[in-house]
């Protein structure tokens, strides 16, 4: 199975009620052999219209953060917990996330990243545990059973609402940069 094959399969997905209002499915984009995968919450208005993740204001900020950390966007893979836009950008509920996660698991299995960056609370709660708090866990390396290093940090949209979060996010991305450099230098 390849990413292209999954993308073809997902095109008519009706597994949850977010299918009703979507314009385009936002499957994910980037390098299929990425060492780093970034996982956000779900598509916003711009993403829904264009079918690409992180292209609005939050995406532009993410681009700047990646550039500052010397990580090229074309070298990473970016996806979300849900692939269809929740109405009014609300947080996807547990049922919607659970319905959509099998698609993401398949993407992770194919890409086999060495680092996963969880952007925000929704990614953290759905991929680590439902009661995990981003304020407590951000900046700390976690590890999956298969040895993927996982770094939770704030979602770029949270930085737009609260600029005080820029400093901790930069600290987190410095750790990500250092780990990423170690990985590419040993490959
Ligand atoms: S959000 Fe995911 S599970 Fe729900 S309809 Fe869209 S692709 Fe399918």
Image (cartoon, rainbow, N blue to C red):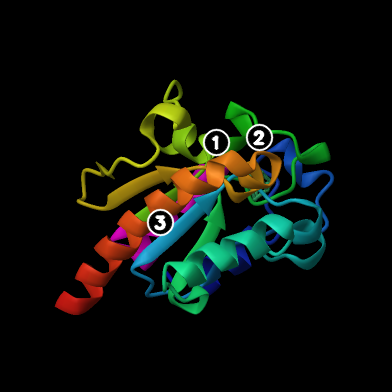
Q: CA distance from mark 2 to mark 3?
A: 26 Å
Residue 28 seen in render: no
The disc label shown at residue 92, or none: 2
* Residue span colored magenta: 100-115
Q: Are dots 1 and 2 in contact, CB under 8 Å?
A: yes
User: Mark 3 or 1 closer to N-term?
Assistant: 1
Mark 2 or mark 3: which is in front?
A: 3
User: Mark 1 or 2 closer to N-term?
Assistant: 2
Query: Circle 1 — which element?
Result: helix
Q: Which residue, given by chain and number where applicable, does mark 3 sit on?
A: 173
- Among the 4 quarters of the image, the one containing residue 173: bottom left
- Identify the residue at image location x=31%, y=55%: 175
Query: Circle 2 — which element?
Result: loop
In this view, the residue in front, 168 or 38, is 168
Query: Circle 3 — which element?
Result: helix
Q: Is residue 31 above or below residue 14?
A: below
């Amino acid at each position: 199975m390849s990413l292209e094959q999954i993308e073809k399969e997902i095109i008519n997905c009706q597994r949850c009620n977010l299918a009703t209002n979507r314009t385009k499915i936002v499957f994910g984009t980037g390098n299929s052999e990425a060492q780093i995968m970034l996982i956000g919450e779900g598509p916003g208005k711009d993403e829904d219209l264009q079918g690409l993740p992180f292209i609005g204001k939050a995406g532009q900020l993410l681009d700047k953060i990646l550039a500052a950390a010397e990580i090229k966007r074309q070298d990473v893979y970016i996806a979300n917990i849900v692939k269809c836009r929740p109405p009014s950008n609300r947080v996807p509920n547990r049922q919607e996330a659970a319905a959509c996660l099998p698609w993401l698991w398949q993407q992770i299995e194919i890409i086999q990243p060495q680092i996963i960056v969880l952007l925000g609370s929704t990614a953290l709660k759905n991929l680590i545990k439902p009661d995990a708090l981003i304020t407590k866990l951000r900046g700390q390396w976690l590890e999956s059973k298969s040895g993927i290093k996982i770094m939770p940090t704030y979602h770029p949209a949270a930085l737009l609402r609260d600029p005080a979060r820029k400093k901790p996010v930069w600290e987190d991305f410095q750790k990500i940069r250092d780990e990423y450099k170690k990985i590419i230098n040993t490959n």
